[in-house]
Image (spheres, rainbow, N blue to C red):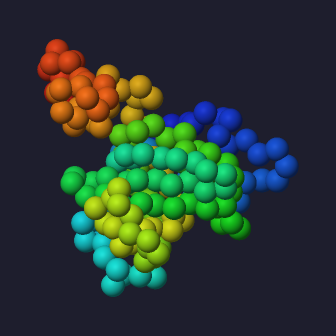
Amino acid sequence: MWYRRQSPSYLYRSTTLPDPSMEQRGLLSTRIPDSTTAYWTEVEDLDTSMAGEEVLVRGRVHLSRVTGKQCFLKLRHRYFSVQVLYAVDEKISKQMVKFIGACPKESIVDVQGVVAKAGVPIESCSQRNLELQGVTFHVVSEAEPQLPLQIDDAARPLDGTEGPVVNQDTRLNNRILD
């Protein structure tokens, strides 16, 4: 069955002008066609020699942070992560930045962006010397807004000195996440 899930309408509402980036974001249908002309790039294969190239990457939202007219997104695939930057301009609207910032952690997303060298090494990502300048953002599978445990909490040591600790029964009940 083909259908398009609808996002909350407040993310799409524009008070003055129509949103120019409406086609560059949204929720994809649950079934993707078998034949696709898109060339997917793995996060681990990204490097600085690809600077200026436009790539298509699929991964999980590890962290998203909206600051003014920008959104920083940490995209994770397997053991590798990359920072994606969305900034308001003629192609990306403020509504698109709000939509990306409201995307729940661990959602699977498709990101299209231009590879750019990072001015300062990004210490929180495995791909430290580059970032993606985001062009499009599509949610493939949206995660629940509140998961029973956060990946960061499960990775902490059990002594409890650094923050919340995930109990053993919670870990066993949610093995798929741990």
User: Which residue is at a point 44% across and 71% down the rendered structure image?
Assistant: 120
Q: Is residue 57 above or below residue 14?
A: below
Q: Percent from the top left, x then y, of residue 84? A: 46, 61
Q: Position of residue 11 (x, y in %)?
A: 65, 40
Relative to 133, is 33 above or below? above
* Drawn side of residue 108 relative to residue 68, left or right: left
Which quadrant is the C terminus positioned in? top left
As drawn, 55 above or below 78: below
In the rendered image, the residue lying farthest to the right is: 16
Q: Residue at x 21, y 54 (%)?
A: 79
Q: Residue furthest front?
A: 161
Q: At 31% from the left edge and 76% from the top edge, which residue is drawn? A: 47
Please tell me in which quadrant of the rendered image residue 88 appears.
bottom right
Front residue of this view, candidates 165 and 27: 165
Dividing the picture into quadrants, the one containing residue 42 is bottom left
- Residue 175 placed where, x, y %? 16, 27
- Quarter of the image where one finds residue 81: bottom left
